[in-house]
Amino acid sequence: MADLLETKQDGVAILTMNRPEARNALSASMLAALLEALPRLAADSSIGAIIITGAGGAFCAGGDVKGFAATEGGANHGRSPEEAAHSLRQNMEVSRWLHDMPKITIAAIPGAAAGAGLSIALACDFRIAARGAKITTAFAKVGLSGDFGGTYFLTQLVGSAKAKELYLLSDVILAEEAERLGVVTRAVDPKELQDEAMALAKRFANGARITQGLMKKNLNTAEKGDMLLSFDTEALNHSRSAQTADHAEAAKAFVEKRAPVFKGR
C-alpha cells in the first residue's frame, strides 16, 4: 500500500498520509509523493482546494524517531550537518507548496499531530481538528530544534512568546486548547471531521478561485511586515481580480439579488 493516497471529489483533492502503523510518520516515499503531488495539483485547473489528512486516527507523528534511534548518527544518518540540511531543505518544500500555492489548503487532523507533522498542518491555510486530538511541537523532547517551517508558521499564528513556550516546552495540548490559542481553526466532533473539512473545501472549490489565490498571495505578502510591499501587491492583485469573469458574475448577481455562480475564471 502506498504511503500517500490521493483521491478527488467535487473539485477537491484529498491527500492521505498512509502509514497508520507508525502514526503516519514521514517516510522517504511519502515525502517524494507529496513533492510530486503538490505542484501538480497546484497547476490542475479541475482542483480548487486540497485537504491533507492522515489514516488510522492520527494526522502525522512527524519524523520517524524509531528509525533515528536505530541509525548511527541519528536524524542525520551519518551525514555532515551541511549535507543533511540540503536534503532536509528539499523535503521542506512540502510546507512551502502548502503555504504558497494559489489553491486553498486544509489540514484535517483526526488525531496526533507532532513535530514535522504539526509543521505541515501549520503550513496549510486552515486546520480542522477532531476534539481530543493531541498536538505538540515535540522537538525539544527528542533533542531536535525543529523543521518543516513550524517555527515560522507558529510564530505567525500565535506570536513569538507563545510560540517559544510551545516549542521550548513541547507540551502536549488538545485540539480544544489549540483552537483557543489559534493554532487550529476549528475543533469539531471526531465523527464530523471529514465532513467539516470537505464542506469547507467545497466552499473554496466552488468559489472565485483566481481571486482566492490572489487574496492568499496578499495575505502571505503581509506576513513579511512590509506595508508598502503589501500595498503594491494588493493594488496589482485587486486590479487583476477585477478583470475576472467571476468578478463580472458576482457584480451581476449582486444587482440581480441572487447568489453568484463562480466558474474559477
Image (spheres, rainbow, N blue to C red):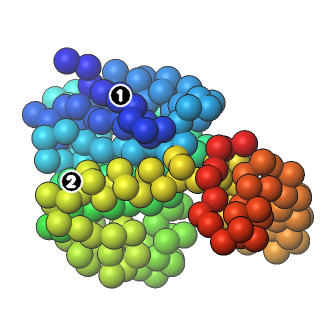
Residue 72 visible in the picture: no
The location of residue 242, given as percent across then percent down, is 84, 58
Identify the image quadrant of residue 76.
Answer: top left
Q: Secondary structure at mark 1?
A: strand
Q: Looking at numbered disc 1 in the image, what kind of residue is underneath it?
A: Glu
Q: Considering the numbered disc 2 on the image, is that residue within a helix, a strand or a loop?
A: loop
- Residue 5: image location, x then y, percent: 30, 27
Quick one: label 1 or label 2, which is nearer the N terminus? 1
Question: Looking at the picture, how far across and down is residue 46, in whole percent?
Answer: 56, 32
Mark 2 is surrounded, within 10 Å at the Cα level, by few (under 14), some (14 to 19) or many (20 or more) other residues, namely many
On screen, residue 142 versus residue 162, left or right, reads left
Where is 254 relative to 65, above or below?
A: below
Foreground pick, 39 / 9:
9
Mark 2: amino acid: Pro
Label disc, if present, on residue 6 of the rendered structure:
1
Query: Where does the C terminus fall, quadrant-wise?
Result: top right
